[in-house]
Image (tube, helix red, strand yellow):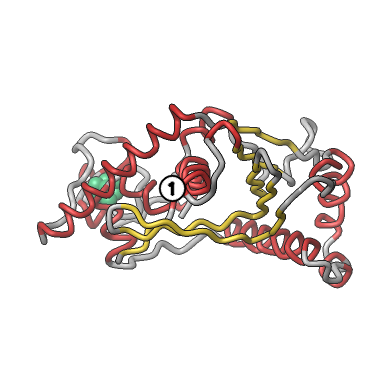
């Protein structure tokens, strides 16, 4: 059974050929040094929050990173309710859940899952500098799949679950210091049904494509998605099509796709 994540759903919807190159052929694109540095900081923050939840010492992690200390302190000051466990019936960081759907295996890992008798909340730590908008996050496959799996794997109805993104490294307008920002996303039966239909559509499409033994379709020839795609040369698209250039597109121009 093929395992699928939110990033793979995103890729498949964005461009099936890009899904083929990235997932089925494992062709990777080197990340820029700035992106890698940001990812390392994000990993440290997630480790810090996991160790804190497990009651393990966090001073060794904090002592080497002043920004980590600042972000944690500001988060605790701004959102004390996040750390108030009263009334909770379950609380776990890095909590994994799985679901089979249409012969695919979906796995999600929640940064923090909090449950009460009558509701549940998924918390996700985001460590890039600029918060995403509510409309972007509502459409993002991470939000959609995380909430969908929670409802499908528990007794909660959609109106009893929610997801909150915390942008822990967001900066104040003058960029002088961090000011954590949150985006709260409620859920509903209508959204749940829509997500179910969309997963059905995408998994059905993927099964057909895999069975066809043909190259996966490309996006339309004039799609702007090709201009910033790392596979433009392979696909003879974008700049590669118009200029015979063998230059790779700047990594900074590549649209971010969460995997
Ligand atoms: S260049 Fe265009 S068609 Fe090819 S993988 Fe990228 S987005 Fe898809």
Q: Name the residue tied to disc 1.
A: 254
Q: Residue 188's x, y, as percent? A: 51, 29
User: Could you tell me which residue is drawn at 67 percent across and 38 percent down?
Assistant: 118
**Helix, strand or loop for disc 1:** loop
Q: Is residue 232 above or below residue 224?
A: below
On the image, which quarter does residue 248 sit in? Answer: bottom left
Q: Is residue 36 above or below residue 203?
A: below
User: Could you tell me which residue is drawn at 71 percent across and 64 percent down?
Assistant: 44
Near mark 1 (Cα within 10 A), the count class, few <14, some 14-19 or many ≥20, is some
Residue 91 makes an appearance in the image: yes
Q: Is residue 239 above or below residue 67?
A: above
Q: Residue 183's x, y, as percent? A: 66, 34
Residue 14 makes an appearance in the image: no
User: Number of marks in the image?
Assistant: 1
In-image side of 82 versus 232 (left or right): right
User: Could you tell me which residue is drawn at 46 percent across and 59 percent down?
Assistant: 98
Where, quadrant-wise, is the N terminus in this rendering? bottom left
Q: Residue 40's x, y, as percent? A: 65, 63
């Amino acid at each position: 059974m093929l395992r699928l994540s939110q990033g793979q759903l995103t890729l498949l919807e964005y461009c099936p050929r890009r899904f083929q190159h990235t997932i089925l052929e494992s062709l990777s694109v080197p990340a820029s040094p700035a992106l890698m540095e940001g990812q390392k900081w994000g990993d440290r923050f997630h480790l810090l929050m996991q160790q804190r939840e497990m009651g393990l010492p966090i001073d060794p992690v904090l002592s080497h990173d002043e920004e980590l200390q600042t972000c944690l302190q500001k988060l605790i000051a701004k959102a004390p309710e996040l750390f108030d466990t009263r009334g909770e019936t379950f609380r776990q960081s890095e909590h994994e859940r799985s679901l089979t759907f249409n012969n695919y295996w979906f796995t999600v890992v929640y940064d923090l899952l909090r449950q009460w008798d009558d509701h549940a909340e998924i918390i996700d730590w985001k460590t890039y500098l600029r918060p995403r908008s509510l409309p972007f996050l509502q459409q993002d496959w991470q939000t959609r799949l995380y909430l969908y799996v929670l409802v499908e794997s528990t007794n909660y109805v959609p109106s009893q679950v929610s997801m909150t993104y915390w942008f822990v490294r967001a900066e104040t307008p003058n960029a002088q210091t961090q000011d954590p920002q949150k985006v709260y996303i409620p859920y509903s039966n209508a959204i749940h049904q829509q997500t179910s239909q969309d997963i059905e559509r995408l998994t059905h499409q993927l099964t057909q494509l895999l069975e066809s033994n043909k190259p996966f379709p490309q996006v339309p020839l004039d799609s702007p998605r090709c201009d910033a795609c790392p596979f433009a040369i392979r696909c003879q698209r974008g700049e590669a099509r118009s200029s015979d250039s063998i230059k790779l597109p700047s990594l900074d121009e590549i649209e971010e796709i969460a995997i």
